[in-house]
Image (cartoon, rainbow, N blue to C red):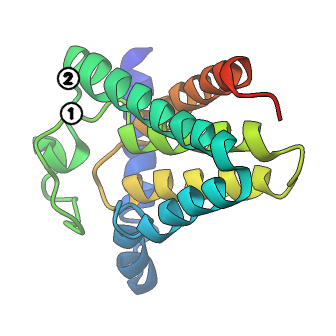
Amino acid sequence: MMHDLLQFDTELFLKIHRGLSNGFFDWIMPLLRNRFFWSPLYLFIVIFCIKQYKKAGLYIIGGVLVTFAMGDIIASRIIKPNVARVRPCNEVRLADQIIHRVPCGSGKSFPSAHATNHFGIAVFLIGVFYRKWKAILPIGILWAAVISFAQVYVGVHYPIDVFCGMLLGIAIGLFTTFIYYKVKPIS
């Protein structure tokens, strides 16, 4: 059963990584997964929260930071070292099939910390802003999904890494949203 699941994961990875290969994706996907590409968005969120919500905005920013920290610690420092799954771009059996679009790195693959962090942040922000701005639901999910998909496309994660990172991120985002509503000042 596990062998079949891993085989399916590898086949799906190759269909995305090689099968969807094109010049536009080769250009945009490395950008979408780059943390510096999203810096203007992060800066906007900070400025918006402070200007619009004053002291309560600091709680929102704090919630985003706690969500990110939890996701990073759980995915990268607890799960990855214990599972120790090799990244597809470092997998010897796939060496002749990998298209090197970004540096691979030596870290482990499962779960995707990018997926964990971005789905966590998206779910947290959806939890905070959904009542006032319904469009944040599809925008937040699409944002996290595109970043996560890019991880597979560039060859640094298998689809299951991203899927499990997504589930972990959603759980963390729901948890930090719950905590946010317990500690935020009444407005």
Disc 2 crowd, CA 10 A, few/some/many (<14, 14-19, 20+): few
Establish if 53 lies above or below 99: above
The disc placed on residue 34 is: none
In screen coordinates, is 42 left or right of 73? Answer: right
Q: Quadrant of residue 185?
A: top right
Give the tally of numbered discs: 2
Establish if 127 lies above or below 90: above
Among all residues in the image, which is located at the extreme bottom?
Answer: 23
Contact between marks 1 and 2 (CB within 8 A): the answer is yes
- Residue 99 locus on image (x, y percent): 23, 66
Which residue is depicted at the point 60% across and 36% down? 59
For residue 144, say whether it is visible: yes
Q: Secondary structure at mark 1?
A: loop
Q: Which residue is under mark 2?
A: 84
The earlier-in-sequence mark between 1 and 2 is: 2
Which residue is depicted at the point 32% across and 61% down? 154
Disc 1 crowd, CA 10 A, few/some/many (<14, 14-19, 20+): many
For residue 120, say whether it is visible: no
- Residue 162 locus on image (x, y percent): 46, 39
Which residue is depicted at the point 45% across and 65% down? 38
Which residue is depicted at the point 62% across and 40% down? 60
Q: Secondary structure at mark 2?
A: loop
In screen coordinates, is 93 left or right of 173? Answer: left
Quadrant housing the C terminus: top right
Q: Amino acid at mark 1?
A: Lys
Q: Amino acid at mark 2?
A: Ala
In this view of the protein, which residue sits in the foreground, 17 or 63?
A: 63
The disc placed on residue 108 is: 1
Quadrant housing the N terminus: top left
In screen coordinates, is 148 left or right of 59? Answer: left
